[in-house]
Image: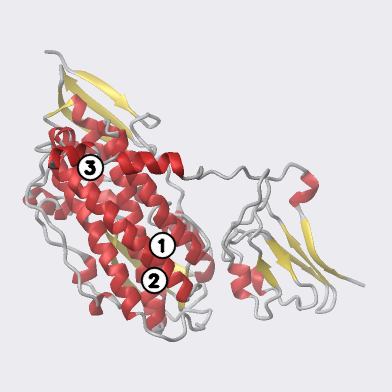
Amino acid sequence: MKRLKKQFSLFSAIVDAFVEPPETIRYPFEPLNLPDVIRGALVLDTEKCSGCGLCVRNCPADALELDNKSRDEFRLIHYPARCAYCGQCEDSCRSGAIYHTNQLVKPITDPETCVVILHDKRG
Amino acid sequence: MSKISIPIGPQHPLLKEPLSMMVDISGERVLGASLRLGYVHRGIERLAQTRTYTQNVHLIERICGICSHIHTTTYCQAVEAVLGVEIPLRASYLRALMCELERVHSHLLWLGILAKHIGLDTIFMHAWHDRESVLDVMEEISGGRVLHAANQIGGVRFDIDHDHDSMIRSALKKLHEQVAGLLDVIENEPALIARTKGVAPVSPEVIKKYCVVGPMARASGVNVDMRRENPIPPYDQLDFSVVTHPDGDAWSRTYVRVEEIRVSLNLCESILEQLPEGPVNIRVPRRVPAGEVIIRSEAPRGELFYYLRSDGTDKPARLKVRTPTLAALSLLPEQLSAIHVADIPVVLAGVDLCVACADR
């Protein structure tokens, strides 16, 4: 009996393999339901950003750059190809202006998208 | 019979990471082997001296792709020790939860690789299927499957709520059943026993001579575990057993690792039950006062050693990392002598090499 049970020990796995849907998702042809905590595309709330540069200072991949003339005139530049999507900028920002969404970042095919100006506050 | 030297690596189907070996064989017997390391040396220790403490958390995470969380945990513990801050108890419990989940996924990954090398593809598929559920849990709570970015100096960056708790508990329950099945296979499957029992046994004396740590040492009967020897909270408040086996062969290494999965699953349940309320992180100063510290923790492959020296600036003056694989690699030539050529993959898999960790 024990031997017979062993012989059929994989039976449930075989049934599961037939019944369960495929694990793979046909992204980008089907939508992806990712957890909210996924660190995807970077977004900046320009209303909240004060240009303090904490995100730039703590970025481990040098993916953010602050081009500032004064406190009121600055540009915040993001280089997505350098970004490690670690979430340090979100963690460092005291006003909650910069954050990751759970949207996947598509591969960069257009050189124009290698530099993203997140905020341009110049006169 | 004449001696033939066969080069294995740095790129070889047998190896998952670059490592060069020159194996001397005579007929079907291996006479000895020599190693060459350094193919994935990235100069991380030197690079860490040029980055701030905060930036280094993410740099240190990239030392290893499998045990990334324990590296950042140990680094953060070192910085916190020099700073003289005590993190909230909830943060240390959450760190330990991730460490134990990481140990489960690392050991399941290893079991899959061993099974693949032996030719038992069914176990490989089962082990990696189970590992996937651990990775799903880690992704759900931290936002990353491999690079979790869960730690920060002063605590953790994630918290778990009631939904997470029930999700983790149901995954743990399922994993308990799966691991019991895997253990049954390991103890009774004739093909696995034939390929691993008595292969490349290592005595406790040799383990101590080469300073080998982790499951390799415990499989030879050396009862050492940093979670017990050097208990950093919450391990001092958790009850767990250290799995050892006296034989020291490839089978006992398999047994010890799979039993450790069960211990880690039990630890995860204990952590969830005892998880205290409170904040998950505290704000710490940017500059770290001058001082030095040594922190040791138990990575999935054994004792992980961090030495940190601060000179009062916002960048470390010296960061030294000693990973468990390095000691296991020094033992490898001895293990590879006087075995059959067909046993080379089993011996290599049994060590559970992480060349990226060793080279840094």
Q: SS at mark 2?
A: helix
Looking at the image, tell me whether mark 1 or mark 3 is earlier in sequence order. 1
Q: Residue at x 54, y 66 (%)?
A: B55
Q: Position of residue B201 (x, y in %)?
A: 10, 41
Q: Does the CB distance between marks 1 and 2 fall below 8 Å?
A: yes
- Mark 1 — residue? B69
**How far, Cα to Cα, is label 1 from label 3?**
23 Å
- On the question of residue B70 being in view, the answer is no
x and y, in percent, of residue A100 in the image:
65, 65
Q: Residues within 10 Å of mark 2 (few under 14, many from 20)?
A: many
Q: Nearer the viewer, residue B129 or B318?
A: B129
**Distance from the alpha carbon under mark 1 to that under mark 2:** 8 Å
Residue B95's disc is 2
Mark 3 chain: B
Quarter-of-image position of residue A6:
top left
Residue A7 appears at what percent x and percent y? 21, 36
- Chain under callout 1: B
Q: Is residue B40 above or below residue A59?
A: above
- Indicate the secondary structure of the residue bearing disc 1: helix
Query: What residue is rendered at 29% in x and 31% in y?
Result: B21
Asked if B81 appears above or below B141 in the picture, the reply is below
Dot 2 or dot 3: first in sequence order is 2
Q: For mark 3, what is the residue?
A: B350
Give amino acid for label 2: Arg
Secondary structure of the residue carrying tag 3 is helix
Q: Is residue B77 above or below residue A1?
A: below
Q: Sort mark 3 into few (<14), some (14-19) or many (20+) by Cα contacts within 10 Å.
A: many
Residue at 32% of width from left, 46% of height from top?
B127
In space, the residues marked 2 and 3 are separated at their CA atoms by: 28 Å
